[in-house]
Image (tube, rainbow, N blue to C red):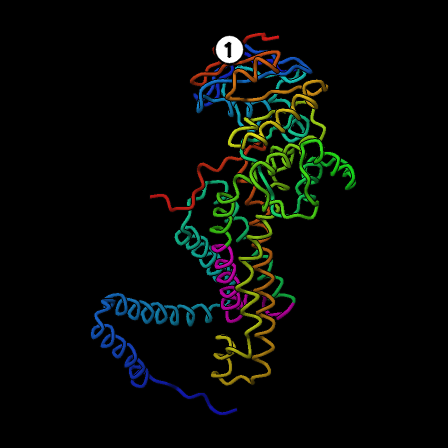
Amino acid sequence: MFRLNNVRCRDIIRVEELCIEEGETTFVVGESGGGKTTFLKLLNHLVDYEEGTITYQDQDLHSLDAVLLRREVILMPQVPVIFPGTVRHNLLIGLEFSKKELVDDSRLLEELAKVGLQKSLVADAEELSGGEQQRLALSRVMLMEPKVLLLDEPTSALDEETEEKITAYISNHLLNSSITLVMVTHSKKLAREMGKKMVTINNGVVTAVEEVA
Amino acid sequence: MDEIIQIGPWRLLLAYVFVVLLLVLVRWQGIGKEKEIIISTFRMTLQLLVMGYVLVYIFGQSSFYVTLLVFTVMLFFAIRNIFARVKVTVNKRLRTVIVVSMIAGTVMTTFYFLLLVINIQPWYDPRYFIPIAGMIIGNSMTGVSLGVERLVGEMKGKKQLIEGALMLGATPKDATITVIKDVFTSAIMPTINSMVGMGIIFLPGMMTGQILAGMSPLIAIEYQIAIMLGILGSVSITLFLFTHFGYLTFFNSRSQLDIKDQRNSKEQ
């Protein structure tokens, strides 16, 4: 699905060779500040690269419309982005941005239930706790039915209970789906337990690619 | 209508008593702004005197070259003033947007207003063309100056939301639509507010001048209403162009947010 060859991006990241296959789960580990987030941003073309090639479904990333690419390769940042407004507005905004068909309230509630979030759709999204906002953001991207989901440390800075809920969601709903998942995590243990491939990035260089299952 | 009262140079000198009074007050209070007050008073007097003689000369010429030259010079200084006064750093692309918006907005409105609303004959009559163009350009300049600062500030302040929207497949326009609306509204509000207060809270300068010069208040009001609508039109068009093209200067051709060369502070 993704092929990276001799990619260099602003001296932040270098990737000699890496393949991410369709439907595969890849975990990205490494020290903080080592370029893991930039690596995810490269894949959905939020940042540009000066050297090398990245292909997505055998097409050069530079030849693709970046906006259309981001409608199927969706990145969920480490700190959830919450737009001013209700829970409903925040759930639907992804579909609106990506010009996809909107869904009804029952579908929204169903998606919230999957991440264990019991909130009214008219609640003020900015009033939710950090963990609730993280789950809301996860529900939002799942409603968009991504082909590739890029998760940037979705459980960092969360309490243990919320971390368990999100990990359970990933394990139950994402690992066995057709979604290609690339997830940055600080937990090598989690990566070994759940992933098929583990990529280690240190000082901006992909230093190891291990098949773990 | 009564004859116009001529102030004359000696009675005009009496008005400078207020400056002397102010100088005494700031000296007494130790505020220490004497130099600025003297320079400002001197500059105001000199600039207006020079402008008076320039206008007398220009009004004596009946040539569209002269009128268009003055119009171009006013527009040039207005644009230069925007760059000099805004307290933010803007890139070359945003500078181009400012120039194009100012030229397009003010040229369109000035010609529409003079040719269709006032219907001046000949079209380049400097007595009408220059003061009206000056008001239109000046107000557009103020609107765009406010808009530039607000746009850079909002793009920086809402960077996370904008990037978050891009991550969800938004186009740059969709990702910044709230910023665009906010910038437009905040920059047009002073013009709208001045319309609301007009005639109740204050009498506008142009109208006051016309009344003092002996014109019937009803005719002066007709002009004032027309010019306010012209100013509103010009500020709206200029700001519309500025906001709808300005936001694009914060993105590159790959729809990536690129704001590193536009800052909230002035480049030293």
Of the pair A61 and A156, the residue shown nearer to us: A156
Name the amino acid, label 1.
Answer: Glu
Q: What range of the chain is rendered magenta?
A: B117-146
Q: Residue furthest bottom?
A: B2
Give the quarter of the figure containing the C terminus of chain B: top left
Residue at figure coordinates x 62%, y 46% from the top left: B177
Q: Which residue is mark 1?
A: A16
Q: Nearer the viewer, residue B127 or B267?
A: B267
| Element under disc 1 | strand
Letter of the chain that mark 1 sits on in the rendering = A
Question: Quick one: B54 or B3, which is closer to the camera?
Answer: B3
Magenta span: helix, strand or loop, mainly? helix
Q: Is residue B151 magenta?
A: no
Question: Could you tell me residue A198's position as x and y percent?
Answer: 56, 13
**Residue B180: percent from left, percent from top:** 58, 49
Where B256 falls versus B207 (above or below)?
above
Vertical order, B189 against A35 (above or below): below
Task: Determine whether A109 is above or below A71 in the image.
Answer: below
Q: Residue at x 51, y 10 (%)?
A: A16
Residue A181 falls in image quadrant: top right
Question: At 53% across and 27% down in the image, what residue appears?
Answer: A47
Give the image quarter of residue B47. bottom left
Seen at 58% across and 7% down, the residue is A211
Residue A53: x and y, percent?
Answer: 56, 15
Q: Residues within 10 Å of mark 1 (few under 14, many from 20)?
A: few
Q: Position of residue B183 (x, y in %)?
A: 55, 52
- Asked if the stretch drawn in magenta spans residue B131, the answer is yes
